[in-house]
Image (cartoon, rainbow, N blue to C red):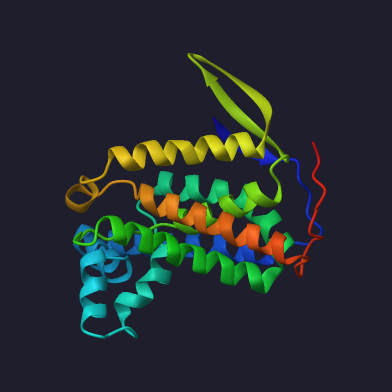
Amino acid sequence: MIPLRDANPTRRTPVVTIGIVIACVAAFAYELGLLANGGEPALERFVTAWGVVPAELLAAWGRGDVASQETATLVTSQFLHGGWLHLVGNLLYLWIFANNVEDRLGRVAFLVFYLAGGVAAALAQVAVAPGSEIPTIGASGAIAATLGAYIVFFPRARITSLVFLGFFYQLIDVPAAIVLGFWFVLQLIDGFTSIGMVESNGGVAFFAHIGGFVAGALVARLVLTVGRGPGRPAAPATVG
């Protein structure tokens, strides 16, 4: 099931979401430039320097060096990607779901929420593989936080999704609660079956997805509990 678009209009242009997309594309273009000019070694040095390396992050914190480049990677890693498929897949989810969350929270609050969600996601992955020396990169943790908020704010929003049935496919409209709930269950299954492999082999940071999603859902629930935020009313209408 691949989401393609949602039927959930916004009141304002999603300036922050567009800015994040541009930043990710620009960072990826820079990575391609490094690869073209310096080859794989140059790109690997850059990714290791600005991606989250759990062992190096915890070593820096163990020395009391909190205001360090290692800490900064909790944010910088959110704008780096490991390939075209990684970038396009992340930006597809970002484009579909982030605009409504930005509209609900307000632009400044959404930017803080997005970056903090990415940090929470990265720390979840660090907690699972604290000794890993493999850098973690990608916007998926922050996007997972956005998905967690979306499912709380707009559970009945209709998501047009591409569903594969063997050799055939079909476009159907599915409630966000089902689309994103299914996505989260897959992350849980893949995450728990990959425990012990990430630290040595790398791969997909499933626990960053899980941690980000849970963090985003909790923040959204808090917003609804506290009351009306700076964006939409506490009980927003959805189309579907």
Left-right relation of 190 to 109: left
Foreground pick, 94 / 155 = 155
Foreground pick, 171 / 103 = 103
Left-right relation of 9 to 6: right
Expressed as whole percent of the image width and height from the top left, the position of residue 230 reads: 76, 70
Q: Which residue of the protein is positioned furthest toward the top in this rendering?
A: 167
Is residue 4 visible to the viewer in this orientation of the structure?
yes
Based on the displayed image, in which of its 4 quarters is residue 127 positioned? bottom left
Q: In the displayed structure, would residue 95 be above or below residue 26? A: above
Expressed as whole percent of the image width and height from the top left, the position of residue 97 reads: 63, 50
- The residue drawn where x is 34% and y is 50% is 205
Based on the displayed image, in which of its 4 quarters is residue 4 positioned? top right
Q: Quadrant of the C terminus?
A: top right
Expressed as whole percent of the image width and height from the top left, the position of residue 130 reads: 23, 62
Is residue 79 visible to the viewer in this orientation of the structure?
no
Q: In the displayed structure, would residue 3 be above or below residue 72? A: above
Expressed as whole percent of the image width and height from the top left, the position of residue 125 reads: 33, 57
- The residue drawn where x is 40% and y is 54% is 208
- The residue drawn where x is 34% and y is 85% is 67
Foreground pick, 18 / 64 = 64
Q: In the displayed structure, would residue 138 be above or below residue 162? A: below
Count of marks overlaid on the render: 0
Q: Quadrant of the N terminus?
A: top right
Left-right relation of 173 to 141: right
